[in-house]
Image (cartoon, rainbow, N blue to C red):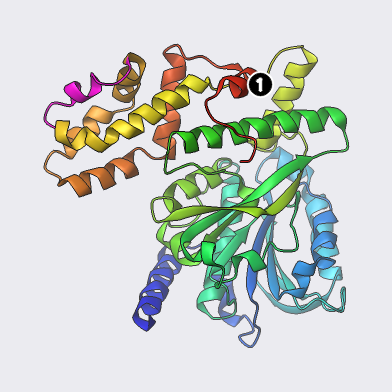
Amino acid sequence: MASDNAAADKTCAKYLAHYAEPEVLSLTSFPQHLRFVHALVIPAFQESVDFIDRFINSILAEQKCLLIVVLNQPDNELGRQHQQAQIDLAQYIVQQGDLHWQQDSLRLINLARANSRANSAILLVDRYQQSIPPEQGVGLARKIGADLAAKLYLENVIASSWIHSTDADAHLPDNYLTAHLDDNLPCQHGVATCCNFYHYSDEPTVHQANQRYERGLRYYVAGLQYAQSPYAYFTIGSILSFNVLAYCQARGFPKRNAGEDFYLLNKLAKLGKVIYLADVVIKLDARPSQRVPFGTGPAVQSIMQLTEQGQDYQYYHPNIFIELKACLTAFDSLWHYREQPENWLFLLPEKSQQALTDIGLLTFICKQKVAKEAQFNKQLTVWFDSFKTLKFIHALRDLGLENIALEQAIADAPFSSAHQ
């Protein structure tokens, strides 16, 4: 066990030395006598102070949690319009406690003065005065926070091997941190977790649009589970936690303005299981937004516009998941046909044959012709990942299995998404 821990520490140290963000270097003078159990990362841009108040007054603040808040803004006109709001939010955070330590862009605020029961702190990261490149956006902000957490874990400042990633619009339940303690059996067998969730808004039109979007998400994951895809999980940045070793092995969050959660999970799922924690339920504030090019906010905006125009929100045809299931089942025998893959393709429905050809299956097979069966199948699972699965689904859609009204898709599907 000691040798395993040493190897893990070496992997993390290598990642931090070669791939971590520069903010990690500022931790050299971090107070080494401090000890936290948990690390929670929240990027914040265009946010009110509500999420700070919510954390300070929560049970989570009584559980030795270091809340790493990355106050970020894009280096563009939108960012400059909101810089004063970022400055005001930073000042508010500092006023909630005592400044315990400061170095470069980092400030550590002890929260005991704000809540006598709190034994937690906020590590405030200033990425609003040194703005973030717009194309790196929230991905870079999350990476900065998670890299800092990984470094503090390696320095034994943080005890838990789990890094929690969420957003300012998330209302975290009381069991959020304790569900990830090292003695929790499900977490011992996973490299990442996705919590349960629901969206809520007091504004009826926004709430209804979010409900439709959420039903689409649950339908999609249920379809992947029905097809027995190893990549059947939710890709929502605010419900994600991950093991620090796996995070370092995956080389951290990709620095991109959207989809960073999707691509990180895609890498993590190749290292181990993504566990779904049904009993840890996060409430997400439902709100339309255009801060990122795709994701929940823009999707909700689009659904609201469709509703105003009297149009249905359309989603993937359920037959797509039937074809995906047949394809994944047939993968078990693909190695035996590696010399003549066209004979294997002939066993599949016509649309699947074309879709697999379109996304490059034959090129993959050509590169694996000398692989043993076990190695071939492992590489096939790695190749046909969540990104390739999505490309396969889109290829089927373009080949004639066109989107239909979401409610009709749910009604016609041979699987239930009610409990996802």
For the C terminus, the image quarter is top right
Q: Looking at the image, which residue is at 29% across and 31% down?
A: 330
Q: Looking at the image, which residue is at 87% across and 33% down?
A: 203
Question: Residue farthest to the bottom?
Answer: 33
Can you identify the residue that label 1 sits on?
407
Q: Looking at the image, which residue is at 42% across and 65% down?
A: 15
**Residue 245 lies in what quarter of the image?**
bottom left
Q: Residues within 10 Å of mark 1 (few under 14, many from 20)?
A: some
Q: Nearer the viewer, residue 328 or 59?
A: 328
Q: Is residue 19 visible?
A: no
Give the residue type that dot 1 points to.
Glu
**Residue 212 lies in what quarter of the image?**
top right
- Which secondary structure, mark 1? helix
Residue 148 belongs to magenta span: no
Name the spot of residue 134 as percent of width and height, x first. Answer: 60, 42
For the N terminus, the image quarter is bottom left
Name the spot of residue 405 as percent of width and height, x first. Answer: 63, 17
Q: Is residue 385 left or right of residue 98?
A: left
Give the vertical position of 265 relative to 321 (above or below): below
Name the spot of residue 209 as percent of width and height, x first. Answer: 75, 28
Q: Looking at the image, which residue is at 55% across and 57% down?
A: 143
Q: Is residue 28 left or right of residue 209?
A: left
**Residue 277 lies in what quarter of the image?**
bottom right
Name the spot of residue 94 as percent of width and height, x first. Answer: 81, 69
Q: Is residue 252 left or right of residue 201?
A: left
Give the vertical position of 237 relative to 16 (above or below): above
Q: Is residue 374 visible?
A: yes
Q: Nearer the viewer, residue 139 or 357?
A: 357
Give the vertical position of 322 relative to 272 (above or below): above
Residue 339 belongs to magenta span: yes
Magenta span of residues: 338-349
